[in-house]
Image (cartoon, helix red, strand yellow):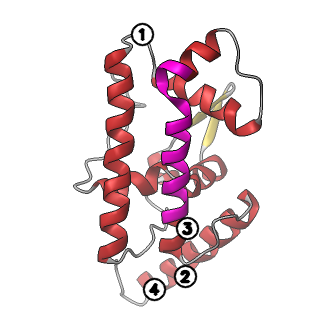
Amino acid sequence: MPDNKLIVFALEDAANFSVLSSEFHQVWCHSQGTVLEDRPVYPKTQCFDPFPFPDLTDTQKTHLRALGEDLDAHRKKQQAAHPKLTMTQMYNVLEKLRTGDAIEGKDREIYDQGLIRILKDLHDQIDAAVAEAYGWPVDLSDEDILFRLVALNKERAEEEARGHIR
C-alpha cells in the first residue's frame, strides 16, 4: 500500500526515464540520499530536484526514449511471463552479474527468467547514451561521475541565480 515514501515521476518522455535509470543518477542518489538500516532512501528534494539532467539534442532524446521503452518493455515482459519474479530479484542478480559474483541456485533461476544479461545490456546502452549526452567518457569511475555532476549542479545553480531557468 502506498505511503509517504512513494515517489511518482510523471514524466512525459521515456528519455527522462532512461536518464533516471542510468548509473549517473544512481551515483548521484547514493551520494545525496540517505539510508534506513541497510536500504537507500530517495528523498526527492535531495535526489531528484537538484539532479542536473543532461541537455539532450533531439537525436539523443530519440535514442534515450527508445532505450527507456525497451527497458520498460523487457522488465514487464519477463514479469508477465514469470509472475513471481520481482524487480528487486532482477536487480539483485544484475548486481551480482556486474560484480562477478557466482550466479547459482535461486539466483540462476532469476537470471534465466529475467533474462538478466539482456537487462544488463540495456542498462549498459543507457549508460553509454547518457554519458554521450553529458559529453563525458563512458568509463568514468563513480567518484568522477559524482565530481562532474556536483560541478554541473553548481554551474546550473549559478545560471539560475542569473535568471536562466532550464
* Residue 13 falls in image quadrant: bottom left
Query: Which numbered circle lies on residue 131?
Result: 3
What is the three-letter code of the residue carrying label 2? Glu
Outermost residue toward the bottom in this view = 162
> At 61% across and 26% down in the image, what residue appears?
92
Q: Specify few, some or many for label 2: CA neighbours under 10 Å numbering under 14, 14-19, or 20 or more.
A: few
Q: Is residue 1 visible?
A: no
Circle 1 or circle 2, nearest the eye: 1
Q: Nearer the viewer, residue 91 or 59?
A: 59
Q: Which residue is mark 2?
A: 155
Image: 73 above or below 110: below
Q: How many residues crowd mark 3 within 10 Å: few (<14), some (14–19), many (20+)?
A: many
**Residue 126 shown in magenta:** yes
| Camera-nearest label, 4 or 1 | 1
Label 4 – label 3 distance at C-alpha: 22 Å
SS for callout 2: helix
Distance Cα–Cα, label 4 vs label 2 = 6 Å
Which three-letter amino acid code belongs to the residue tagged 3? Ala
Q: Position of residue 109 (x, y in %)?
A: 57, 13
Amino acid carrying mark 1 in the image: Lys
Mark earlier in primary sequence (1, 2): 1
In three-dimensional space, the C-alpha distance between marks 4 and 1, rounded to whole angstroms, equals: 48 Å
- The residue under label 4 is 159
Is the Cβ of the residue at disc 4 closer than 8 Å to that at disc 2? yes
Rendered-image quadrant of the N terminus: top left
First to last magenta residue range = 112-129
Q: Tags 4 and 3 in contact by the CB under 8 Å rule?
A: no
Query: Disc 1 and disc 3: Cα gap in Å?
Result: 34 Å
SS for dot 4: helix
* Mark 4 vs 3, N-terminal side: 3
Q: Is residue 145 visible?
A: yes
Q: Nearer the viewer, mark 4 or mark 3?
A: 3
